[in-house]
Amino acid sequence: MINQNNKLRFDGTKAMREARSITTECDRKSDYGIVDAELALKVTSFDRVFKGVVAGGDIKRTVEIALEKRKGEAIGVEFGGMGINLFKGFSDGFFKQTIGVSLSDYRTDDGKLKNSNGQRNYKDGRQHNIIIGNLFDTEIYKKIDRVIDNKKVDFIIERMYAGLDNVPSNFLVLITILQKWYKMLNEGGLLLVETPDFAVSVVREWVKILQSEEFLDVAFDEFRRALRIHKLEKAPAKLPVLKMDEVKNILNNNGEI
């Protein structure tokens, strides 16, 4: 049930500002057990969450097939993590540029990169940048634009595990962030998102709307709360969304408010 101290709000700007404040404060008090996880083959790896929404449970294969035409030029972003170990799991040379956006810097002093962009160049030609900041802060997206020279992104992934517990139970926050990430994507781009627990009943109904769109390929694993959106060629510029009264009806029908 939605926490009564965290009721639905309808002011998008206020909601994002609140989310930024709450997540920053919670991060100061939290000790996350999973930091900079691997793509696959580990108990804490990304494939454990997204195996129900990618072909054969294989993120690497799914992404590299979907973005085959972008091989060697593809840009990938992890929100809510460092992205170092994640992007090492893809084929050498597949991504040209990758970014990890993390609220805190979890590298040891020895592992921290010296330049201001947190940039590392790999032997396969890939450039990886780490941006420290809050994904609910509009300034973060300006920094990303500067790093990628205002290009579109081909792959976005978010899997914050316990960090999602700090996200306010506010659907305007979720909708605003997903619209922002979707807008960042190239046509043909792929979005993988672990959704918050409070949003499952609404996302379930929203996915039905998304799946009715001809040029969107969408899947939702309700058990793992994993959402996949493949933005096909000719896809809509914005995601269709539920109206707030529809959200309230869904929550009321499920006894969640």
Image (cartoon, helix red, strand yellow):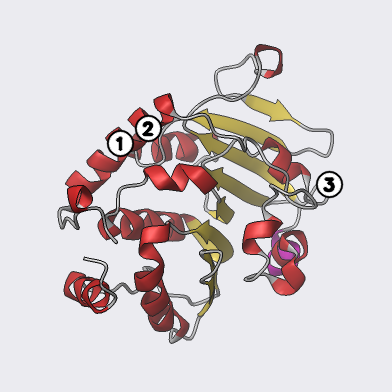
| Mark 2 lies on residue | 26
Q: Is residue 19 left or right of residue 192?
A: left
> Mark 1 or 3, which is nearer the eye?
1
Cβ atoms under marks 1 and 3 closer than 8 Å: no
> What residue would you read off at disc 1?
22
Q: Residues within 10 Å of mark 1 (few under 14, many from 20)?
A: some
| Label 3, residues with CA under 10 Å away: few <14, some 14-19, many ≥20 | some
Of the image marks 1 and 3, the number of the one nearer the N terminus:
1
Q: Are marks 2 and 1 in contact (CB under 8 Å)?
A: yes
Q: How far across and how far down the image is residue 203, in percent? A: 39, 70
Residue under the point 58% across and 63% down: 190
Characterize the local packing of mark 2: few (<14), some (14-19) or many (20 or more) Cα atoms within 10 angstroms. some
Closer to the camera: disc 3 or disc 2? 2
SS label for mark 3: loop
- Which residue is rendered at x = 70% and y = 49% of the image? 45
> On screen, 178 above or below 25?
below
Instruction: Report the quarter where the N terminus lies.
Output: bottom left
Q: State which region is magenta.
A: 64-70
Compared across the picture, whether 68 is left or right of 183 comes to right
Disc number placed over residue 92 in the picture, else none: 3
Residue type at numbered disc 1:
Ile
